[in-house]
Amino acid sequence: MKFNRYKNILSADIAGLENEVNTLISKGCKPLGGISITVADRNIVYAQTVVVEDESNNSLGEFSSEPGYLSEVRRLVLNGEKLAAVKHLKDNTAMGLKEAKDWVDTHC
């Protein structure tokens, strides 16, 4: 069985995000990069990406399907277009530029 290796945690308040991320850390997950803050429809959304390094760790849930943008990120990297891959990941997630670059470096 295959399990998710990363997950974007979203919350309307920083305390809620911190609680959920700390719970996942206690289950063997690690935060990737810093907290991203997005304003959507005059609401603030806090986001943190967490990852697991052990493929048998099921704390992020069972892997069902990969978002389409990740397939495109991997295709761009394979074609030698790493900068475009980082930009595509950043544009399709709540990740900042550094977090997206770190994710591409680690997972592609």
Image (cartoon, rainbow, N blue to C red):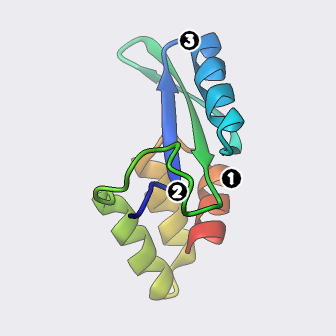
Other residues around mark 2 within 10 Å, as few (<14) / some (14–19) / many (≥20): many
Position of residue 78 measured from the top left corner of the image (x, y, whole percent) = 47, 86
Q: Is residue 12 left or right of residue 20?
A: left
Tell me which residue sits at (49%, 70%) in the image.
Answer: 84
Locate residue 74: give its quadrant.
bottom left
- Looking at numbered disc 1 in the image, what kind of residue is underneath it? Lys
> Of the residues under marks 1 and 2, which one precedes in the sequence?
2
Numbered label attached to residue 98: 1
Q: CA distance from mark 1 to mark 2?
A: 19 Å
Q: Secondary structure at mark 2?
A: loop
> Of the residues under marks 1 and 3, which one precedes in the sequence?
3
Q: Is residue 90 visible?
A: yes
Position of residue 108 measured from the top left corner of the image (x, y, whole percent) = 55, 75
Position of residue 47 measured from the top left corner of the image (x, y, whole percent) = 55, 31
User: To which residue does mark 3 refer?
Assistant: 13
Q: CA distance from mark 1 to mark 3?
A: 23 Å
Tell me which residue sits at (34%, 60%) in the image.
Answer: 69
Q: Is residue 61 left or right of residue 54?
A: left
Other residues around mark 1 within 10 Å, as few (<14) / some (14–19) / many (≥20): some
Tell me which residue sits at (35%, 70%) in the image.
Answer: 72
- Looking at numbered disc 3 in the image, what kind of residue is underneath it? Asp
Q: Secondary structure at mark 3?
A: loop
User: To which residue does mark 2 refer?
Assistant: 5
Q: CA distance from mark 3 to mark 2?
A: 24 Å
- Tell whether label 2 touches label 3 (CB within 8 Å): no
